[in-house]
Image (cartoon, helix red, strand yellow):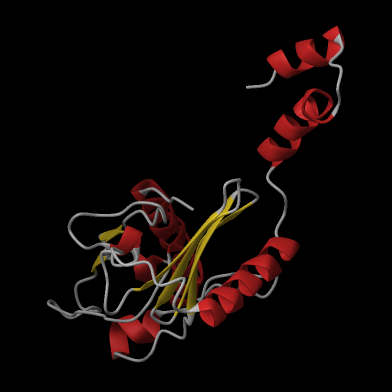
Amino acid sequence: MMVSQGASRAAVRAAKKTRRCCSSVQRVKASSNWSTIRSRRGCAGGTRGAARLNWPGRVKPGTVVDEPMHIVDMYPTLAALAGASTAKCKTLDGLNVWPAVAEGKPSGRTEVVYDVEPFRAALRQGPWKLVWQTTLPSKTELFNLVEDPSEKTDLAAKNPQKVAELKARVEELARTAVPPLLMQEAVGAASHVLFSSVALPADVKELETQP
């Protein structure tokens, strides 16, 4: 799940329109969390990617928040600051993390879902991060981000129970997720070619029209 800095700025603009009390929020920037990246600078595939918030009078200069947060927490946090209700929204994945930012309290986030797709997934719970490539040949990696923030040592073979727990959680998330439309269209167009012994000209033509 990659989210650009533009998305965070759009969320701030929406909050400003909701209530003028947020008009002094000057800048919010969040980094990408692409789960497959291995940073040479120890960013743990985005887990330790920093975000910045500038709000004079509300956020003390020099404040450092060492609590797990996710880009999906931005919407409910800004909505709460603006006095907006999310009661009528669909179920949100995000949390209001303002108490963690302003008061030093725990963020309440116990896991970070990087990516859940039919062919790959990545999930973090506590110090453990699972990276799972499901396409053949499949590949499973497990990292302890507290001890190994650069993800250099794969601990999957030494911790099969933890791997099984995180995979079960990924399966649970996948069952409740909406299937990607791109995958449905691509697989649907290619199904006759992939899963039958004979491809008719109409099948090939339909496949060629897919992006």
Q: Which residue is drawn at 86% across and 22% down?
A: 197
* Drawn side of residue 82 relative to residue 62, left or right: right
Q: Is residue 106 above or below residue 114?
A: below
Say whether residue 155 is left or right of residue 182. left
> Residue 102: horizontal and vertical position, in percent?
30, 84
Q: Position of residue 180 (x, y in %)?
A: 68, 45
Q: Which residue corresponds to the image point at 75% horizontal and 38% vertical from the top-left?
A: 184
Q: Position of residue 75 (x, y in %)?
A: 49, 65
Identify the residue shown where x is 73% and y is 18%: 207
Q: Which of 79 and 18 is in front in this view?
A: 79
Q: Which residue lies furthest to the left in this view?
A: 62
Quarter occupied by residue 168? bottom right
Question: At 19% from the left edge and 54% from the top edge, which residue is drawn?
Answer: 40
> Camera-side residue: 110 or 191?
191
Residue 193 position, x and y percent, is 79, 23
Q: Quadrant of the C terminus?
A: top right
Is 155 displayed left or right of 101 in the figure?
A: right
Q: Considering only vertical position in the picture, is 206 above or below 75?
A: above
Asked whether the viewer can see residue 89, the reply is no
Q: Which residue lies furthest to the top in this view?
A: 201
Please state if 151 lies on the left or on the right of 116 as rendered: left
**Total numbered circles:** 0
Along the line of sight, which residue is nearer the eye, 124 or 52? 124
Q: Can residue 38 be seen in this view?
A: yes
